[in-house]
Image: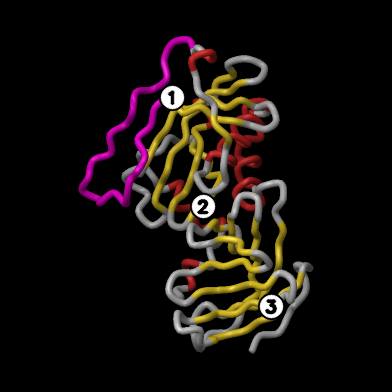
Amino acid sequence: MPSHRLFFCIAAFLALTAAAQPAPATFHMVQRIDEMLVGVDAIALDVVDRDHVAGTYFLVHAQRPSPLVGYANYVVDCRTPQRIAILNSVMPSGRLEPEQPFVQPPRRSGRTDLARLVFEPVHTMDGTALVARFSCEASGAPGRAAQIAAELAARGSPPDSRSLYCQMQPDAGQAARRVEVRYSAAENAVAVNGQWLSSGFVAGDEVVFGVGAQWRVDTRKRHARLLRDNGRQLFKGDCDTRPESMPSGR
């Protein structure tokens, strides 16, 4: 399994977003899902009333920051549990090719009629949960927008999330590394070193992710195994709940 699918430095993709010329200068990345960065235009945040914030979020490909991949105007209901209404959007049904032009949807204009909007629950794996959290928090503290975004990108998770720190070997022959595996049973979502993976899911005591060779993390026995499709074990490492622990791999 290629290491870039599993190990990604927050600083690296913050630098990539800065290079995305079509995105506004006030673009704040709040989440990475596979190769897609999810960011919000902080300047476009608009407080509709005490409970609702309108805004715009963008999808940017981490390896090809130009052109933008997707774009949506939305309104968030900041009351618990947070919900979101999408006003209009251009979202990918698949990966856009570089030669395909990006067509922006109409910008928000005029008064927002909340009574006509349909609000839906927010979710981690479509990006709306962290978009909503950023919108509600940053609209009340615009001077801290960059800090809030960085915190969400690094640690934003569903309320039930737990973490294990496991020894993993992403590439044969390379040294094993200690990796954070964060998972949410309620959202059926998995993040590895802060990168959310569409291949990830939670099945009982196991956290599973990967394409081709597959990682299976046993949360009860606290070990991680890398298995081929035929079940052959390529690597096994220990896991711990303590970030500073250094388990062994074999």
In magenta stretch: residue 184: no
Q: Quadrant of residue 90?
A: top left
Residue type at mark 3 is His
The residue identified by callout 2 is 32
Secondary structure state at the residue bearing disc 2: strand
Secondary structure state at the residue bearing disc 3: strand
> Which residue occupies 71% across, 62% down?
163
Residue type at mark 2 is Arg
Query: Mark 1 or 2, which is nearer the eye?
Result: 1
Query: Mark 3 or 2, which is nearer the eye?
Result: 3
Give the farthest residue toward the left: 99
Distance of mark 3 from mark 2, alpha carbons? 25 Å
Residue 96, image x, y percentages: 29, 49
Secondary structure state at the residue bearing disc 1: strand
Residues marked 3 and 1 touching at CB (< 8 Å): no
Residue 188, image x, y percentages: 59, 54
The residue identified by callout 1 is 87
| In the displayed structure image, the side of residue 185 where residue 169 appears, left or right | left
In magenta stretch: residue 104: yes
Earlier in the chain: of badge 3 and badge 2, it is 2
The secondary structure making up most of the magenta span is loop
Distance of mark 1 from mark 2, alpha carbons? 23 Å
Residue 191, image x, y percentages: 59, 59
Residue 53 vertical placement versus 99 (above, below): above
| In the displayed structure image, the side of residue 99 where residue 213 appears, left or right | right
Earlier in the chain: of badge 3 and badge 1, it is 1
- Nearer-the-camera pick, 98 or 85: 85
The residue identified by callout 3 is 223
Q: Magenta residues?
A: 87-111
Earlier in the chain: of badge 1 and badge 2, it is 2
Image quarter (top left, top right, bottom left or bottom right) of the C terminus? bottom right
| In the displayed structure image, the side of residue 161 where residue 109 appears, left or right | left
